[in-house]
Image (cartoon, rainbow, N blue to C red):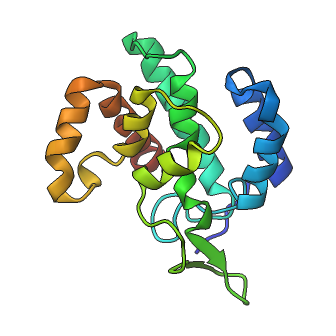
Amino acid sequence: MKEINFFSEQERIEQFNKTMYYCMPDRFKREFVDDLQEMGFFTAPASIHHHGAYEGALFDHSLTVTNSLLSLTKRLELKWQDERSPLIVGMFHDICKVDNYHKTENEAWEYNNATLLPGHGEKSVIMLQRYMQLTEEEMYCIRWHMGAFDEKENWNSYGRACTQFPNVLYTHTADMIAARILGV
């Protein structure tokens, strides 16, 4: 794995605070950031075989998805149940990955087969609900952000989610812009 580390953990935390400040409840801002740091949100890779296969890429990818979703929202005049939603959905759609990888003794990243919660989108929803109340739209956008990359037997549910909450499709699009076009 090629290590690309443009930003330090502290620089990522500062960027997170600047990006997310207005949509985070004051009562737990510092505690939440501390928890994210402890979980590895600012140091974990986004993957080890695909996009963002470097230390810190989980945050870099999440920020890129957030910025892509904000851009789509502005350019396409997307309507959300809550104005904070593009920030919450973009930043935390992959929070499930904080325990997906661990470093080996020789400092290489390796997949962790011993996580307590399996899954991807649903795991992110479960983890995030410990910290904030999600709107129904945020929950579905995070759950279905993988789009047709989800299991084939789930495609009909994904389609129904897009019909009821069109921003599910735009969340998937923002994720693909980040991962497949920008490579983060």
Residue 68 appears in the figure: yes
Count of picture labels: 0
Report the residue at 56% width, 51% height from top: 127
Q: Residue at x 60, y 67 (%)?
A: 99
Quadrant of the frame with the N terminus: bottom right
Residue in the foreground of this view, choosing between 114 and 166: 114
Nearer the observer, 70 or 35: 35
- In depth, the one of 46 and 141 nearer the eye is 141
In the image, residue 81 above or below residue 167: above
Q: On screen, 44 above or below 101?
A: above
Give residue 46's position: percent from left, percent from top: 55, 59
Residue 161 placement, left or right of 122: left
Instruction: Classify 12 as above or below 153.
Output: above
Q: Residue at x 50, y 34 (%)?
A: 89
Outermost residue toward the bottom? Answer: 105
Give the image location of residue 27, x and y in percent: 81, 29
Q: Is residue 8 visible?
A: no
Query: What is the x, y in percent for residue 101?
Result: 59, 72
Residue that appears at 64% across and 76% down: 102
Q: Quadrant of residue 100?
A: bottom right
Image spot of residue 126 (x, y percent): 50, 49
**167 relative to 20 in the view: left or right:** left
Q: Quadrant of residue 157?
A: top left
| Residue placed most toward the observer, 173 or 27 | 27
- In the picture provided, is 29 more to the left or to the right than 59? right
